[in-house]
Amino acid sequence: MTGPIAWVGGQASPLSIYMQAYLHRDQPMILDDVDGLYADRQGVRLLKALAQTEPRKTLSWYTQTPILERHAVPCQFTTASRVTLIGNDWKTLNADVAALEDRGHVVVFEPAALEVHRQAARWFWDQEIFDLVGDHLHLIERHSLRSYVNAWELKQAGLDWRQGILSRCLAGAALAVAKLRANPDFANEAERVQAFVQSGAGCRATYFNHAKKLQPASHTPRLVLSHTCPPGAAPTVDYLDRLRRRYGDLGNG
């Protein structure tokens, strides 16, 4: 797809979409984050007209609206725009929504957690966070790229970033076991079991029952990140280290 594209995002109302369709008539339109629009009868009627399969379609707005007059938008116009709807959820609430679906193609994008993890490896920069997420991919039902950045922000703030990751897929005793197993401060399993019991989360048998359930059915391949800092952040330069490597030990003079 080449040429200008009209991108409408956020909580767009049917009226604002009508205006954008006029201002960008004959251009492809992308309506992003429109999850609630299909629940609006007026919005569905507008989308049905905009998604008609004819080369040119007619859009109408006959309700008297001062904002249309101020922007010189007519109450009816034709356009050749094709439209794409992007949303986090979609429900066929009634026959009108079903008719809207019939005008196009419904594509459900549900990548596996491992595929999201591989995508994150192309740009993420903290190997410790990345590896912990990778160890628990089998427990994540709906993975998100935001998980990595959120965990990094918690880490930068000195907060419990491990809990931030694990609490997305675990709760209760299972979360307590996962946190202990991810904590490098414990030397062995016996120390983790002792801490688990002392915390009141459960007994020794409860610990091992949950630990067994946390084990993945198959091994997740470990990916080594090529980035070491956030995008746009310049790495810290240690000039003294550069001098030592070039001239050897530096004196005090």
Image: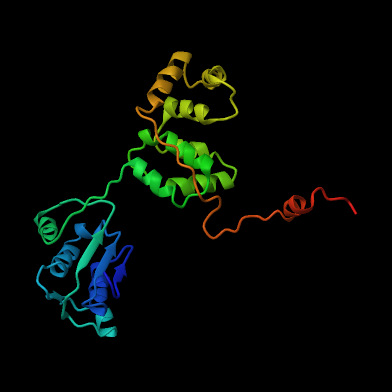
Residue sitting at x 52%, y 42%: 127
Is residue 251 shown left or right of residue 232? right
For the residue pair 160 and 118, the one nearer the viewer reads as 118
In this figure, what is the number of numbered marks? Answer: 0
Is residue 45 shown left or right of residue 197? left
The image quadrant that residue 187 belongs to is top right
Q: Position of residue 21 (x, y in %)?
A: 23, 74
Residue sitting at x 50%, y 30%: 179
Q: Position of residue 120 (x, y in %)?
A: 42, 48
For the residue pair 79 and 242, the one nearer the viewer reads as 242
Q: Can residue 145 be seen?
A: no
Q: Position of residue 246 (x, y in %)?
A: 75, 53
Image height of 95 relative to 62, above or below: above
Q: Can residue 40 be seen?
A: yes
The image quadrant that residue 214 belongs to is top left
Residue sitting at x 39%, y 31%: 219
The image quadrant that residue 73 belongs to is bottom left
The quarter in which the C terminus is drawn is bottom right
The quarter in which the N terminus is drawn is bottom left
Image height of 56 relative to 90, above or below: below
Task: State the colouring used for the structure image.
Answer: rainbow
